[in-house]
Image: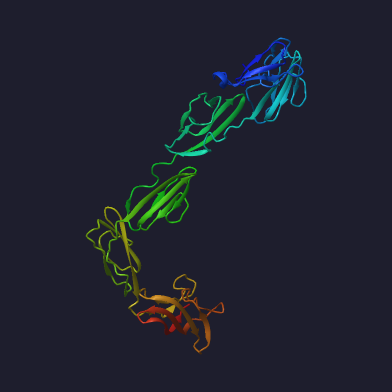
Amino acid sequence: MAPSGKILLSRFGSPFLDAISLPNSQGSGSSYKEEYLKFDSGFTTIDLPNLVLTGDQFQFIPDVDLYEPYSLCDGQILQLEVPSCYDSIKWYDFSTELIHTITEPGEYWLDVFYDQCYYRQEFEIIDYVLSNDLLPQDSVICNEESIFINLTDAPIQGDFTWEDGTDVLQRTITEPGLYFVEINDNGCLFRDSLFVQKYILPDSVIPDDTMKCTEDILFLGAAVFQASYKWSTGELTPSIQVKDEGLYSVTVSIDRCELIEEIDVISFGNIDLGLIDSLTICKGEPFELNGTNPFVNSYEWSTGDTGPVISTTEGGEIVLTAYDDNCSYKDTTYINQLLCTEAKVYLPNSFSPNGDGINEIYHIFVSNDVEYLSSRMTVFSQNGNRIAEIEDMTQGWNGTMDGLRVPPGVYAALVTVRVIDGQGERDIHLPRDILVVR
C-alpha cells in the first residue's frame, strides 16, 4: 500500500511496479495500470518516499519524525536534532550537522541518506502568535463594582495559570491590585496583565434638605480624599458657605467614580420688629422705642435693656435683637439729636494770680447742654493797649503780659466762644471787665 492509497505490485526481475489506483472498486473500475512506476538508479521518491528496491526486496528508512509543525516564539530560537543512524543528512541550507538552529518561521526540508537510499522530509515552522487582549485594559472600579473576566472562548492553547496559582476560566475581580495570567503554549510563554484601582466614595457628603435662619451662614462640606469637586455655584473647593436659600448641588469625582448630590436650603423667614429707620429729637430729651412682636420670645437692645419697649435719651444707632425658638432677628434705628437750648457762657469778674494757689487762672465756663467748639480772649489795658491774646481759653489766662506779671487793677477783655446750640453753629462775643488782685 502506497501513501497515496494505491496498491503497488512488483514483478520479479522487472524495474517497474504496477498500480491499482482504486482498490475498493471491482473489475476495470479498479483502474489497474501496468508499469506504473519505474526505479531509476536504484531508488525513487514518487509515491514511495521511504521504500527502496534492492534486488528482489524492499526495505524501510528509519523515520526522521519531523511531521508535526513547530512553533517559534517571538525572540526565541528552535533547535532540531536528527538521529545519528543515517549515513548522511543535508538540511535546506546544505549544512550537514545533526543539530540545526532555526530562527525564523517558514517551510523547510531535510534530506537523509541511508544504505544507498534517499528520503526528503519537508516540515513547517510556524510563528507563534497569541492575542494580547485576553484581559481587559487597566481599569478603575468604584465602591461595590466588579470586573467579570470570561476566558471560556479565548484563543488559549496549552496550560495557563493566574497570579494566585488558579486556572479558572471565569473570574470576578472586586479588589484593587495587579492581576495576570501566564500561558505556556507549546513551549512559548505569554503573560497578559490587568491593573485595577478601586475608589470608595461615601454614600452622602452633604446633609438632607435643611432650613436655616435668614441671616445665618450655612457651611456645606464635601471633603473626600483624592477627590475633585464642582458645586452648582461654580466653586471647586471641598466646601462652600451658603447664605441665600435655594437648590445647591455638588459633583464629587475620583477618576471615573462620581457622586452627585443636591440639597434644598430653605429660610425660616424674617420677622418685622417695627422700628423706624431714623428719628430726630432734642438732645437730652427722652424718647420711646417699641419692638413688640407676638412671635418673639426675648429681646436684647444695644442700650442694655431686655424688654420689648424702652425709653432712652441716647443718640446714634440703636439695635434691637429679638429671638424666637429657631432664629434671631435684628432691627435698627438711628437717633439724630439736636441742641434745642441756647448756650450759656459764664465769665468771672476777677481772679488773683498771686502765687497762693487759689484762683490763679482766669477761666470761662460754657453750659453742658450745648456743644462747645472753641474760644479765645483778648485783654486790653486801661488806656486801650492790647496786652494779651489767649487762643484757647480751655487753658485760661494766668495774668501775665509777654511772660511778665501785670499790675493789679481792672482790665478790659473781649471773649469769643464758638458753640453749637439751638440756633446752630455760631460765635458768642462777650465783653468783660476783669479785676486782677495780687
Residue drawn at x 72%, y 15% as measured from the top left: 15
Residue drawn at x 70%, y 22% as measured from the top left: 79
Q: Position of residue 38 (x, y in %)?
A: 71, 19
Residue farthest front in this picture: 28
Q: Position of residue 97 (x, y in %)?
A: 76, 20
Q: Position of residue 366 (x, y in %)?
A: 39, 76
Rendered view: 308 above or below 335: above
Count of marks, rendered view: 0
| Display colour scheme | rainbow
Rendered view: 113 above or below 188: above
Q: Indicate left or right for 317 with 136 as reference.
A: left
Residue farthest left in this picture: 294
Q: Quadrant of the N terminus?
A: top right
Q: Indicate left or right for 111 with 70 as reference.
A: right
Q: Nearer the viewer, residue 76 or 375?
A: 76
Q: Nearer the viewer, residue 389 or 123?
A: 123
Q: Nearer the viewer, residue 6 or 150?
A: 6
Rendered view: 127 above or below 356: above
Q: Position of residue 12 (x, y in %)?
A: 70, 10
Residue farthest bottom in this picture: 383
Q: Quadrant of residue 54?
A: top right
Q: Quadrant of residue 124?
A: top right
Q: Quadrant of residue 2?
A: top right
Rendered view: 121 above or below 249: above
Q: Indicate left or right for 129 with 273 as reference.
A: right
